[in-house]
Image (cartoon, helix red, strand yellow):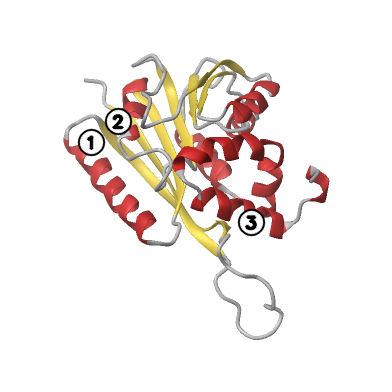
Amino acid sequence: MSVSSRNTDDARAAFQTCQSSDPRDRVEFYDSWAENYETDHTLMNYRSPQLAVDFLSEHFSGNPEEALVLDVACGSGWVAKLMAELGFKNFEGVDGSQGMLDLAAKTGLYKDLRLALLGPEPLPAQPGVFDVVIIVGGLDAGFAPVSVVRELCNAAKPGGFICMSRGDHSGRPAEDYKAELDRELRLMEQEGLWTPVGTKRTDRYMEDPHVDTKGLKEGPKPELFISGTAYLFKKSKQ
């Protein structure tokens, strides 16, 4: 099916398949989804990239042209394109799907792109050198494990920013993941690895792909969007 013929039903089905597929099969799915990835996310009013980049830009006071950015789970390069509009020029990207990396390469924004499945494989990034480490949408049950946040922090240079955004998907696995993530973020703060800059919430992170929108013209409508959060931390200088 061509990109131009996609509709919200197609996009919703793709999201459902992605979230329900076995993690071992998900890379293959992303390879096949690459062509329609941004179209489907736009159809679902996916705001995670904009949420993260806007929140980061509110607090970043350095020279964006000189900043080195590590874009983790970079996908099609959506985040880098938004950051480039703000003057950022130096990007390295990591993703588990070669199909997505091929799309990211077409943006011409990345100095380096590396294939790695986070969790089973370590984050392929030099430690302590990045002014900004950002991950959008990859922190959820069945995707990048919570342990990855320590690798993100390790990649940032002292005083560098770590920015993360994720949606509040429904279901017990997602709820358990959120609880584990919150514990890990607090623990890393207690250990002195980073300090929280803040969080930014939205009630309209994206349309809920599991809501059946058919027949909603009459009567009360269910909540069509899921909420989401952007997290921003600054790596300790010690």
The residue furthest left is: 191
Identify the residue at image location x=34%, y=33%.
148
Q: Amino acid at mark 3?
A: Ala
Identify the residue at image location x=46%, y=46%.
22
Q: Nearer the viewer, mark 1 or mark 2?
A: 2
Q: Is residue 44 visible?
A: no
Instruction: Report x, y in % for residue 181.
Output: 30, 46
Instruction: Report x, y in % for residue 79.
Output: 58, 33
Q: Amino acid at mark 1?
A: Met
Instruction: Report x, y in % for residue 183.
Output: 23, 47
Tell me how far mark 1 sits from mark 2, CA to CA: 8 Å
Task: Please give the label number shown on residue 25.
Answer: none
| Secondary element type, mark 3 | helix
Q: Nearer the viewer, mark 3 or mark 1?
A: 3
The quadrant holding residue 105 is: top right
Vertical position of residue 46 compared to residue 53: above or below: below
Q: Label 1 belongs to which residue?
A: 188
Badge 1 crowding class, 10 Å Cα cut-off, few under 14, some 14 to 19, many 20 or more, is some
Vertical position of residue 107 compared to residue 1: above or below: above
Badge 3 crowding class, 10 Å Cα cut-off, few under 14, some 14 to 19, many 20 or more, is few
Identify the residue at image location x=17%, y=38%.
190
Tell me how far mark 2 sits from mark 3, CA to CA: 33 Å
Callout 1 touching callout 2 (CB < 8 Å) = yes
Q: Label 2 belongs to which residue?
A: 150
| Secondary element type, mark 2 | helix
Q: Earlier in the sequence, mark 2 or mark 3?
A: 3
Q: Label 3 belongs to which residue?
A: 13
Q: Is residue 34 left or right of residue 148?
A: right
Q: Amino acid at mark 2?
A: Arg
Vertical position of residue 175 compared to residue 24: above or below: below
Q: Earlier in the sequence, mark 3 or mark 1?
A: 3
Instruction: Report x, y in % for residue 51.
Output: 53, 45
